[in-house]
Image (cartoon, rainbow, N blue to C red):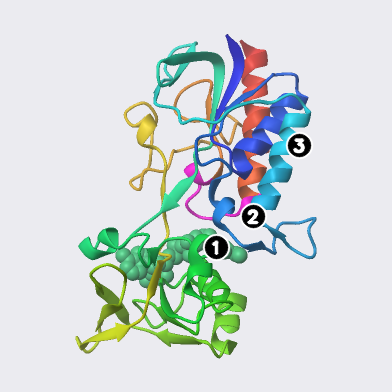
């Protein structure tokens, strides 16, 4: 039986691992097939303190992982398939393999949302993408659009101007949700054209994306915009399916963590802690995720000492 198992390997999980390992708790991180979390599909990270010239998301996560490994963290690069978190012994399965621990830290993060259009899923990977960093390269000299009005959409649109000939930013309202600095950067970029008050109602093309059908929500005007790529950047859903029925969650599926016992990362079950985007629908930053990962490791350590 282990003292602690960490599920998930973004900034939250790996920070928890660094702290738990340095606290002699010999953590096991079940990092998942898509290890590293959302930063693995982020280009430049300019707001992580300590990197004044910026760093790419994958490079930053490689640093996190190496630091966790340096203090003895063990890793399993597979997905958790089942958990039983009630009771003093926490049970975690990776396929048929059972892992047991006294405490668990959940840091499974969140995943990109899609529009839910039939042709969006049919043309996924054929011009539809949720990751500009992964796929932007394929759109050299082509016209593309980004859907969304938050910081992610701004970041994707800016990044895509490195390759694309033209980037339409399609947002369902007049006002962008993004921070002022991102908003200004977008408006100053001559390759980006804002298409506001507008929604995508269909993705066009048989084998590859050939355009999007748009509707202005004020005038109800419908028109087709020819382009070869659609990047969806409309927010995220927490990865909490695995824990359904076992932990308290809010209406959007984020794990509820409490402040009442002085342990900000404590969940509704003793010995189970959650950190990062899986429990934070508000800040969702690498640095806040890392901070809550540190808190989760300290909370888990206090819990283990109290047993
Ligand atoms: P977000 O802030 O929640 O924005 C999602 C955007 O998608 C909103 O503009 C929303 O429209 C739109 N949207 C949602 N559902 C839609 C639908 N079905 N159809 C059309 N549009 C839809 O998400 P995010 O941009 O992923 O950012 C998440 C968090 O990460 C934020 O706190 C953000 O600041 C942060 N972030 C920071 C950076 C950075 O600082 N470098 C980079 C990326 C993200 P409405 O505005 O109308 O709701």
- Crowd rating for badge 3 (residues with CA inside 10 Å; few <14, some 14–19, many 20+): some
Upstream in sequence: badge 1 or badge 3: 3
Contact, mark 2 vs mark 1 (Cβ under 8 Å): yes
Q: Which residues are magenta?
A: 277-287
Mark 3, residue position? 67
Mark 1, residue position? 133
Quadrant for the N terminus, please. Answer: top right
Q: Secondary structure at mark 1?
A: helix
Q: Is residue 152 left or right of residue 127?
A: right
Q: Position of residue 58 (x, y in %)?
A: 64, 51
Q: Is residue 17 left or right of residue 140?
A: right
Mark 1 vs mark 3, foreground winner is 1
Upstream in sequence: badge 2 or badge 1: 2
Q: Residue 75 occupies which quadrant of the picture?
A: top right
Upstream in sequence: badge 3 or badge 2: 2
Say if the magenta span includes residue 172: no
Instruction: Give ligand 1's quarter of the image.
Output: bottom left
Mark 2, residue position? 57
Q: CA distance from mark 1 to mark 3?
A: 25 Å
Contact, mark 3 vs mark 2 (Cβ under 8 Å): no
- Residue at 49% x, 63% y: name it: 135
């Amino acid at each position: 039986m282990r003292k602690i198992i960490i599920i998930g390997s973004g900034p939250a999980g790996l920070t928890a691992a660094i702290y738990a390992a340095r606290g002699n708790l010999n953590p096991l991180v079940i990092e998942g097939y898509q290890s590293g979390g959302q930063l693995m599909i982020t280009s430049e990270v300019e707001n992580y303190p300590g990197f004044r010239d910026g760093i790419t998301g994958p490079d930053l996560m490689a640093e996190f992982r190496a630091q966790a490994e340096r203090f003895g963290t063990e890793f399993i690069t597979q997905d958790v398939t089942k958990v039983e978190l009630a009771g003093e012994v926490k049970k975690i399965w990776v396929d048929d393999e059972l892992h047991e621990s006294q405490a668990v830290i959940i840091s499974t993060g969140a995943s990109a949302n899609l529009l839910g259009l039939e042709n969006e899923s049919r043309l996924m990977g054929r011009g539809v993408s949720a990751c500009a960093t992964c796929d932007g390269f394929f759109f050299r000299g082509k016209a593309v659009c980004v859907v969304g009005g938050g910081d992610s959409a701004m970041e994707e649109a800016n990044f895509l101007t490195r390759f694309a000939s033209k980037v339409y930013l399609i947002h369902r309202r007049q006002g962008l949700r993004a921070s002022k600095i991102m908003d200004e950067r977008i408006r100053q970029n001559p390759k980006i054209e804002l298409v506001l008050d507008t929604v995508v109602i269909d993705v066009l093309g048989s084998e590859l994306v050939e355009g999007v059908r748009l509707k202005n929500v004020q005038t109800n005007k419908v028109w087709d915009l020819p382009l070869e790529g659609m990047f969806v950047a409309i927010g995220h859903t927490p990865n909490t399916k695995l824990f359904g029925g076992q932990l308290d969650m809010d209406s959007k599926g984020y794990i509820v963590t409490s402040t009442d016992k002085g342990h900000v990362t404590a969940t509704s079950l003793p010995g189970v802690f959650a950190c990062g985007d899986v429990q934070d629908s508000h800040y969702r930053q690498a640095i806040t995720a890392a901070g809550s990962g540190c808190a989760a490791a300290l909370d888990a350590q206090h819990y283990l000492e109290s047993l």
